[in-house]
Amino acid sequence: MGAYRNTMASTSPSRAGQMARAAGTVMVFFVASRVAGLAREVIIGARFGTSAELDAYLAAFRLPDILFQLVAGGALASAFLPTFSGYLVRNDRAGADRLASGVINLLFLALSILAALAALLAPLLVRLVIAPGFPPEQQALTANLMRGMLLSTVVFGISGVVMAMLNAYQHFLLPALAPVVYNLAIIAGAWFLAPRWGVRGLVMGVIVGAAGHLLVQIPEVARRGWRWSPVLGLREAGVREVGRLMGPRVLGLAAVQLNFLVNTILASGLAVGSLAALNYAWLLMLLPQGIVAQAIATAAFPTFATLAARNDRAALRAVLASTLRGVTFLAMPATVGLIILREPLIRLLLQRGAFDERSTAAVAYVLTFFAAGLVAHSVVEIVARAFYALHDTRTPVLVGLAAMLGNVFLSLLLIRPLGYGGLALANTLATTGEMAVLLWLIRGRLAGLEERRLGATVLRGVLASGALALVLAGWMNRMGGESALIVGAGGLALGALVYGGTAFVVGAEEVKEALRLVRRK
């Protein structure tokens, strides 16, 4: 606690340096998590390709994920962490412990009841809501898989609170390691159980992975001195504050989950494998987004929350602006690389076993539209957390609701001419609008975002991305007939050199700062 208070009371450069080190730590494990997640998808793709069985597995995830996100996922984290950080800033450890215990206990009761009801009504929910376009036997499989996955939802709820506690303590190692454990369990299920149990082996991997996600974090939170107590804390001011902050955020996440549900419903009426193609393309887009935006946002959020608790708006503005510059600078080349190198990368990463050329073409088609929204998704990840740190969950929720309505409208409009690619394009357009509105609003809240420096970063990024696009297009034209390893991996290496070199030539401060950090290490 003393180290935590001293660090957060330090100067802005020290604070930024601490956040950069935390982001570096988280990024390493986010890379490990994404690599494990990619290995998971490679093995699942080889086992199931873009089959009807995999479509059922993905549809079965929908309701458990909705329950987790609405009750225990992003809604709880965005409300719990700023409140918990407030207790730490006031050095009220007893209050912090009561808050965590009360939230965990309430969460366990709520998720257990909801999961039991969902399991009981699973066949009806699948038939009428989740996948009405599936044939009856595929709907029955989806319902059975969903019942197993609901067990993981309860465990993940508790794990999410523990993760937020550790992040508030500025401890990022184990929370970043937990997703790696989760992915490894699913890999084991796909590798050892799927040959014998089919797609049910994946469900067992999900259940075991959720348990591992929680257990790997418990030793550290216990070492910090927290002890569970059997209280609900309904009269605790902190618990009521978490509930107040969660309300608008739950509504916003309901909008996000409704988007995913609409995509599942619409894709269930398209050709077999449409839902699988959407899922693979989405995960490939999330690979750089997770490594860059989510890692940085995870490290930045506790800092945002502490600065907001201290009412230090100037420091919050400076840290947010710096974070946005770094995220934008890294997301732009990732967008270009994903679009131009999409086919060789998909062949390299996924094409084996049941995942054939047809699957590659389907995923590449969707990835083009998803990748165009990578910058927007990354910026929204950061800006939304700044609002949460300010104890304002209503503003990003209202903007998210508007984006959701736009997404649904565009999905219905674009699915006819573009098929499942229209669902991806609708998501990109809606998220881009959401990013623009959130930036405008947070700028007014913080009296600016250092617009000149941010604009200069974007301009340098555009110039470097333009050079990158030209080089990669030439690379594809010259090397397109070579193996996927040469074209894909070689293109990534060449692209990194071109973008970094061009950015350095045009004077990108982000590159120079990265070089200074390397020399310092």
Image (tube, grey):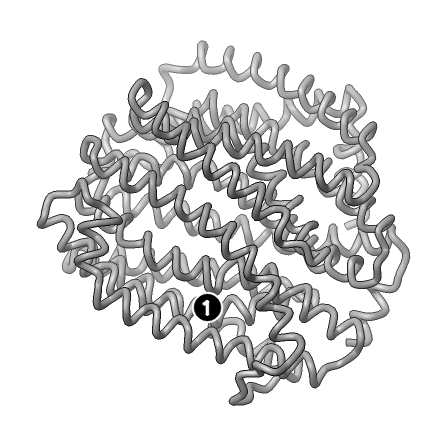
Q: Residue at x 19, y 31 (%)?
A: 271
Rendered location of residue 417, percent (x, y) = 31, 18
Q: Is residue 318 left or right of residue 242?
A: right
Count the numbered circles shown: 1
Q: In which quadrant of the rendered image does the N terminus lie?
A: bottom right
How packed mark 1 is, by other alpha carbons closer than 10 Å (few <14, some 14-19, many 20 or more), is many
Q: Residue at x 47, y 39 (%)?
A: 404
Residue sticking out furthest to the right: 11
Q: Nearer the viewer, residue 135 or 222?
A: 135
Q: Is residue 427 left or right of residue 463?
A: left
Q: Is 403 rendered above or below residue 502?
A: below
Rendered location of residue 471, percent (x, y) = 57, 14
Rendered location of residue 406, percent (x, y) = 47, 32
Q: Is residue 67 visible?
A: yes
Inspect the image, locate mark 1, and give the three-letter code of the amino acid beneath it.
Answer: Gly
Residue sticking out furthest to the left: 137
> Helix or strand or loop: what does disc 1 sit on?
helix
Q: Nearer the viewer, residue 358 or 405?
A: 405
Q: Is residue 454 left or right of residue 52?
A: right
Q: Is 520 rendered above or below residue 212?
A: above
Q: Is residue 47 visible?
A: no
Rendered location of residue 147, percent (x, y) = 24, 64
Residue carrying label 1: 157
Q: Residue at x 34, y 74 (%)?
A: 113
Q: Is 110 rendered above or below residue 449?
A: below
Q: Residue at x 82, y 37 (%)?
A: 448
Image quadrant assignment for residue 235: bottom right
